[in-house]
Amino acid sequence: MTNRRNFLKTAGLMTAAAALWKPSDLFASSPADVKGAGKKLDLQWENFMGKMKFTFNIAGSSRTETPIVITRITWGGKAGYGEAAMPPYLGETQASVNEFLKKVVNDVLPKFDNPFCIQDIMLAVDKLSTNNTAAKASVDIALHDLVGNIMGQPWWKMWGFDPNKTPYTCYTIGYDASDDMVNTKIEEASWTHMIKVKLGMEEKEDKRMINLIRAKRDTPIVVDANQGWKDKHHAIDMIGWLAERNVQMVEQPMSKYKIDDIAWITERSPLPIMADESCQRLTDIRGLKGAFTGINIKLMKCTGMHEAREMLTLARALDMKVMIGCMTETSIAISAAAQLSSEMEWADLDGNYLLGNDCFNGMKLVDGRITLEDKPGLGLTKKPGIISL
Ligand code: MG
């Protein structure tokens, strides 16, 4: 009986303590403890080859796998996962990411005793080199997952975003020279409410792809020209033709080096024109105002979630539209990007669906719509037996 009474007393105290708990309780009051009570930020990583379900064709390249590096940061018994996904055009490799992460371990992490100062940690990570944006993102994403796990909250909630406003994800129907193959892909994409098509080829092929889809589906389409159109007059003619076929938006109509031509197109276009290859990071956005209607944020280009959040704010302040996209990524980076998705006009977060060997469960699509669950961090669960990290 006494034991039970003591238990209830203790339990009551514990409940009261939990109610008064605040993040700063993670540190005690002594100066040494404020620095993290001797806990160390530990970064590990593992190379991983993402296998695509289909050969992926875009203007200028074709591939069947994507090199990925999975990262994990631990602190005080908690862990967070991150990822660098590297399509060839980013210019990063598993070897370059491994080298970069060694520098993070040697030169950055020893200066920080806790993961909460993401802003300062990422400033220091960013200073290590001018590029390596995917490698940087792999640190940023792991830090966000870790901090969310420690706080016991998802990032969409800590940022104050409404999980009921999430968009449908675009799903890409890849180019194929065979009508039969394209028709198969259209059927496999029957669940999607927003089709994405990669154009920027010859006019005949571009129109064939749209006509094949429109023969079977009237679902809204977004088009990504991937810098493929060479002439602004051709581009604006194509955009007019697309606008008559329930296309909602066109991404990167021409080369990022032809900003004046793109501005000319945007001025005349009946559809929003979004910057992808032209927009890597926060500092690019101001120069794109006027030339594009909006920007496509991708974590692998912009060094991760903290800068993506800043890009969203700046683009909105400049009255620009915002979408969030991805590379071929596992559920780690897709779930990270999904945290921002409710603030986006469009979300193109199908990367994990294109992978045959996703190593995590994370953000789920329900009837093609991005869903944000009330789970800590990025809401990840590791699938057994795929990676050892
Ligand atoms: Mg694109």
Image (cartoon, rainbow, N blue to C red):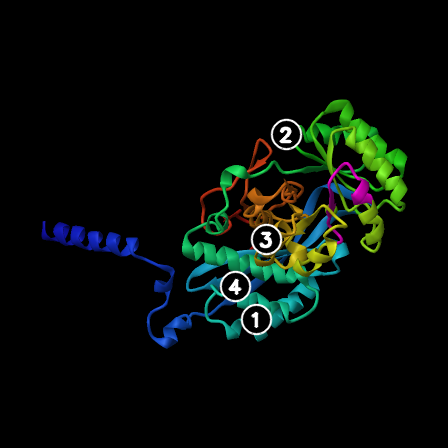
Relative to 371, does residue 387 appear above or below in the rendering?
A: below
Horizontal and vertical percent position of residue 161: 50, 46
Tag 3 residue: 313
Amino acid, disc 3: Thr
Q: Badge 4, how many Cα within 10 Å: few under 14, some, many 20+? A: some
**Would residue 389 be visible to someone looking at this image?**
no
Residue 12 location, x and y as percent?
20, 52
Crowdedness near tag 3: few (<14), some (14–19) or many (≥20) residues, C-alpha within 10 Å: some
For the point 49% across and 65% down, which residue is it?
117
- 38 drawn magenta: no
Q: Circle 4 is placed at which residue position?
A: 118
Which span is picked out in magenta?
Answer: 265-278
Q: Which residue is mark 1?
A: 105
Determine whether, in the image, residue 168 is placed left or right of residue 162.
right
What whole-number distance in Å separates the C-alpha atoms at marks 4 and 1?
15 Å
Q: Who's the residue at 54% across and 43% down the image?
A: 363
Cα separation, mark 1 vs mark 2, equals 43 Å
Task: Classify 10 Å Cα crowding around label 2: few (below 14), some (14-19), many (20 and above).
Answer: some
Q: Is residue 373 rendered to the left or right of residue 254? A: left
Q: Is residue 351 above or below residue 278?
A: above
The answer to whether residue 309 of the structure is visible from this angle is yes
Q: Mark 1 or 2 closer to N-term?
A: 1
Sequence-earlier tag: 2 or 4:
4
